Image (spheres, helix red, strand yellow):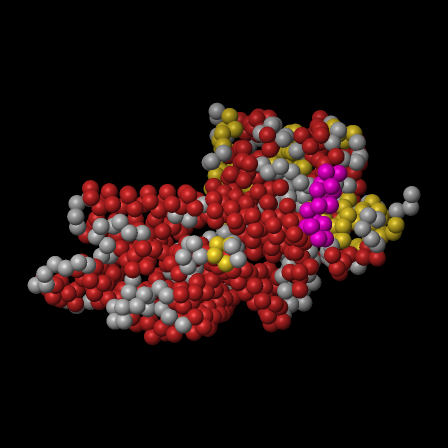
Amino acid sequence: MIESNFKNIKSLKEVDRVRVVLVGNPNSGKSSLFNSLTGLNQRVGNFPGVTVEKRAGSFRVNKNLKAEVIDLPGTYSLSPRSEDEQVTFDYLSDKSRNDLAEITVVIADASNLKRNMLLASQLIDLEIPVILVLNMMDIVQRNKQSIDIKGIEKELGIPVVPMTARLGKGVDVLKERIGNFEYNLPKKFVEDHESKDGLENTVHRFEKIKKLVDKNLSGEKQTRTAKVTRRIDNILIHPVWGYLIFLFILFLMFQAIFSWSNLPMDWIENGFLVFGQWLGEVLPQGVLSDLIVDGVLAGLGGIIIFIPQITLLFAFIAILEDTGYLARVSYLTDALLKRFGLNGRSIIPLLGGAACAVPAIMSARTISNKKERLLTIFVTPLISCSARIPVYTLLIALIIPAEKQLWSFNLQGIVMMGLYLLGFIAAIATSFAMKYWVKSDERSHFIMELPIYRKPRWKNVGFTIYNKVKLFLVEAGRIIIAISIVLWVLSSYGPGDQMAAIDKKYEQVEDFEGKSTQIATEKLEVSYAGHLGKAIEPAIKPLGFDWKIGIAIVTSFAAREVFVGTMATLYSVGDDEKTLSIKEKMEKARNPTTGEKVYTKATGYSLLIFYAFALQCMATVAIVVKETGGWKWPLIQLLYMGLLAYVSSFIVFQFFS
Amino acid sequence: MLDQYKSGDSLVLEEVLDPQLSIQLYCMGFLPGETIRIEKIAPFGDPFIISVEDSFVSIRRADAKKIKVKLLSI
């Protein structure tokens, strides 16, 4: 109503702030518009109570008026069918929010006008202030069609703005129209008395829309873009080539991620080494300097190093999604995934899980069937995520020489691929078993739009990568700094006077080579961390892990990549020159009683398997609690994955030793 | 029913026999009286891609069984 949304203000000239709500069908170019309006003034958060991604931002409409923007999840209509769409519906129908004047901007794909007008017409009938944006006018032109903007404006009684959001065309006009907005209640598109239930209403609505569109859209019927899309589909979703192409793209993706990221990763690693050395020299000697260099910096370096890989993975997924290819992958895989109790839409969470399980689990919201969604959420963390990359990279480098080959392929690369494959197999096998265990009488559908192909909108891709990497860095970075500090304290201090006793013991001993390392190792053993690790050693000994690994397993429950940070911190204590990388330090590690290498092949493979399967991620547990609305499923998941990891590691260790 | 036809067939949508399915399809532009086309059928007969004008949508065979259509007479 006027009262609730405009607070008795007739014109926006009387206020200095306004809220702009963006709504539209999926694939209508809503994100492009949001990005051109806000630029980097945007933040990603959650809607209260649910975990649907909420993007908000701000921009200046004119010199007197500032706008905050909310980007609602895409929806075809106001009859919600997934929880994503429910959020949009709830937000729009909430009339109690009246803190700010509010304008709803509905974005319609003008090249598919009829279908896109449904939502717009429903919004008009909610009697809220609406501006209609007709996006993708470039495609309309290319299809040799034209739209009578003024005609539609007159018939609907609301402002209509033509736009090509991809190229930023029309955005200024939209701002102008928002600035000059005056609310006059337009007449209803479909009167309430004209139809009874939702179905009849929709049919009736479309009859009217058809008339409207036929009157205002002229030009060719058979469109070029659809023809092009059909032609591309003939290849990309060909019954044979389609699958081969998909596998090839996957292969290329992972090859690129691992080979392109080598160089920047080296830079980051060396950069941190140099920086740490320099910092150690300039800072006054003492506890604080040790804490910063050995604790915080070592831990932080361990996570920043794999930003190149994460960025690349997010980039590939964003590009595949933006071009329209990802929807085809769902089509190609539905028949297969259906057999395992999943859905074609599950492929997006499963692929995304290779980057990070948290956003991947959130993207499972588009699966409307509850059972399929639960299964997808349950198995997604088994897919090897980017947080496992540093763990895998470190361990593989440690146990397999770089030059070792198998059938002229690099063995390190093969083991890495194998771990990803293992994760995927575990995921679908688990889902298959759960299919029979979780009961549901809800019918399963796979109704999914396949958007026309288009060139990636690089700006969108860029923003997606930026937001995801930022979120990851902030979330993971926070945990890692905290844990690094705790760890450093735990490994630098110990109960009683055991530490002092070691100092005393060595005071009388003459200097010998490796004396300081010897002292540090003995001290670590009697530190709090050492005691903690020793306490769990009996439980993990059958897997081939010693107490230092025990500490790392405990701390990396926060997040897997903490394993590397922990190793860095644990092995930094005592490396006075700070010239060795973690890998070199771990290579040198010897069992103090037997003098054998700690990281043997058996221990290495066992650890790899452990990290492939165990749910070592607080963030994932937290998101599953939110998504499934309780602790039941995350606890089952935690237990199941832990057990799977323990048993598999045990078998692997026994096999290799 | 839709599942009886083959890839490339142009059909007139008559009725969707499942209320939940019908509202979803209607909202995507698949309405009674519209001319729809079977664009593709995946290997082993599932799922389908159907189109109305320039909208492409994939549905499963199980759902296609509930969509009443007739062949477009030219």
**Left or right of residue A557: residue A57:** right
Percent across and percent down for residue A252 are 56, 48
Span colored in magenta: A226-242
Q: Tell me which residue sits at (49%, 45%) in the image.
A: A312
Q: Residue furthest front?
A: A408
Residue at x 51% of width, y 54% of height: A409
Left or right: residue A576 versus residue A607 is left
Does residue A472 belong to the magenta stretch?
no
Q: Is residue B16 visible?
A: yes
Can residue A184 be seen?
no
In which quadrant will I find the N terminus of chain A?
top right
Give the number of marks. 0
**How would you classify the magenta stretch by its main secondary structure?**
helix
Question: Could you tell whether A41 is left or right of B44 in the image?
Answer: left
Between residue A393 and residue A231, name the one nearer to us: A393
Say left or right for A510 vs A563: left
Return the residue nearer the eye: A115 or A508. A508
Q: Nearer the viewer, residue A632 or A608?
A: A608
Q: Residue at x 36, y 56 (%)?
A: A564
Residue at x 12% of width, y 63% of height: A506
Is A611 situated above or below A112?
below
Residue A89, image x, y percentages? 61, 48
Tell me if residue A635 comes above or below residue A446 in the rendering. Answer: below
Extreme left residue here? A508
Is A234 magenta? The answer is yes
Quarter placement of the C terminus of chain A: bottom left
Q: Position of residue B5 (x, y in %)?
A: 84, 54
Q: Position of residue A613 (x, y in %)?
A: 48, 64
In the image, A584 versus A233, the foreground residue is A584
